[in-house]
Image (tube, helix red, strand yellow):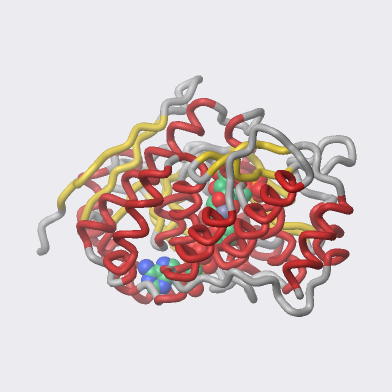
Amino acid sequence: MTIAKILDQVHVALPDNKSYDIVIGSNLLNQASSFTPYCQGREVLIVTNPTVAQYHLDSLLEGLGSMCAKLNVVEVIDSEEAKTSPYLEQIYTTLLEHNYSRRSLIIAFGGGVIGDLAGYAAATYQRGIEFLQIPTTLLAQVDSSIGGKTAINHKLGKNMIGAFHQPCNVIVDLEVLKTLPARELSAGLAEVIKYGFIFSKEFITYLEEHLPLLLAKDPTTLAYTIARCCEFKAKVVAEDEKEAGVRALLNLGHTYGHAIEAHQGYGNWLHGEAISTGMVLAALTTLKLIEQGQEGLNFTADDLARVKNLLQAANLPIHIPENMDAQAFLKYMARDKKNLANQIVLVLFASLGQAYVEKHVSPQTITQIIDAYRN
Ligand SMILES: NC(=O)c1ccc[n+]([C@@H]2O[C@H](COP(=O)([O-])OP(=O)(O)OC[C@H]3O[C@@H](n4cnc5c(N)ncnc54)[C@H](O)[C@@H]3O)[C@@H](O)[C@H]2O)c1
Ligand SMILES: O=C(O)C(=O)C[C@@H](O)[C@H](O)[C@H](O)COP(=O)(O)O
Ligand SMILES: [Zn+2]
């Protein structure tokens, strides 16, 4: 058996006994029982999909051994479409058919789609049961498995039906990334790069220098990068669990990006791809506000070029889909969860490596930005 190794551990500090650890390491799955106490003697349901199951389920089942009092697996379809009611229903039905109780535990074993769906099932089944995150994509390891945002989509808007429900533990096994397709790795890198844009110019420079190693899945570089991202997210979630303030910064690029995902049909643009273009639009919005005379912003055309270059180096799109005009964006942006009384709220660049929440961008300005970038 390959030896399991813990490489890092990040604590998410929350009130009301909701704190938990993110355990980062290699070969953790097939010795899972050693790294999480939460399955011992519990009735456990693993929620996954056929792709993840094909590659990694045997390993996890081996790792859980006989520690669970009951263990079943439910596989939903492998698609963003899984974040809809029929698949939530599939999980509830499995739980009920096997008499799972309030003391039972759900394991979300997959990417962000599985995490959001299984997390929402856990938040709502019998008014809420515990769940454990075992994220298997880069995106899920650095972002979606942490912080307790769980949701399904609505055709009129992304993640519109959901709940804040924190996991009891997050187990990040770097080994699973070996089977992750290149396009999905790049989508995860969009959220990695996002942390640099929001919180740290030094991290941007690190990513500019280490992107080839990340794309080559170099284990040391991946481990360092994932741990730094988990730290960024853990800190902001600890400060503002339910997005009353600073947590909104994690939405950089998402107001534009979610509009792209919904308009294109969920899954056609990957989430990371949509927010890549969304972050370029956020940068263009900052530049537009500076042009309009807004003070206190320190962002230049050279910074925009760095934003675009880094995203492109990660093989991410930076252009608007051809079939989307400003009206198409505004239709979805008007329903964004951050909005206040009919005012679109955007997360923009205060400078390169520092984001802020902007409450005063008009639909006319957004139209000008999109029209200019399309041509
Ligand atoms: N809750 C949050 O805070 C949060 C944060 C960011 C994104 N999200 C959500 O996460 C979703 C995107 O997540 P994602 O990018 O992980 O996509 P995903 O869950 O669809 O996974 C991407 C693809 O990779 C496959 N896959 C997963 N692990 C694999 C592995 N180890 N090897 C091979 N293939 C593997 C999946 O089956 C899928 O086909 C979106 O719905 C987005 O809205 C949520
Ligand atoms: O954790 C957060 O907070 C985030 O905003 C992380 C985002 O990367 C993620 O895509 C999240 O699901 C978006 O949340 P939403 O509230 O805009 O749906
Ligand atoms: Zn995101």
Question: With 107 as the anchor, is 171 left or right in this view?
Answer: left
Question: With 294 as the anchor, is 48 left or right in this view?
Answer: left
- Establish if 200 lies above or below 176: above
Q: Residue at x 49, y 20 (%)?
A: 15
**Residue 45 lies in what quarter of the image?**
bottom left
- Establish if 302 lies above or below 170: below
Q: Nearer the viewer, residue 239 or 275?
A: 275
Q: Nearer the viewer, residue 16 or 63?
A: 16
Quadrant of image for the N terminus = bottom left
Question: With 159 as the anchor, is 37 left or right in this view?
Answer: left
Q: Position of residue 80 (x, y in %)?
A: 61, 68
Q: Residue at x 41, y 68 (%)?
A: 185
Q: Nearer the viewer, residue 366 or 26?
A: 366
**Residue 136 lies in what quarter of the image?**
bottom left
Q: Can see residue 73? A: yes
Q: Position of residue 329 (x, y in %)?
A: 80, 62
- Residue projecting furthest to the bottom: 322
Quadrant of image for the C terminus = bottom right
- Residue projecting furthest to the top: 16
Q: Position of residue 269 (x, y in %)?
A: 62, 72
Give the total number of marks visible in the rendering.
0
Q: Can see residue 120? A: no
Q: Residue at x 63, y 38 (%)?
A: 297
Q: Residue at x 36, y 59 (%)?
A: 208
Q: Nearer the viewer, residue 255 or 61?
A: 255
Q: Position of residue 52 (x, y in %)?
A: 41, 70
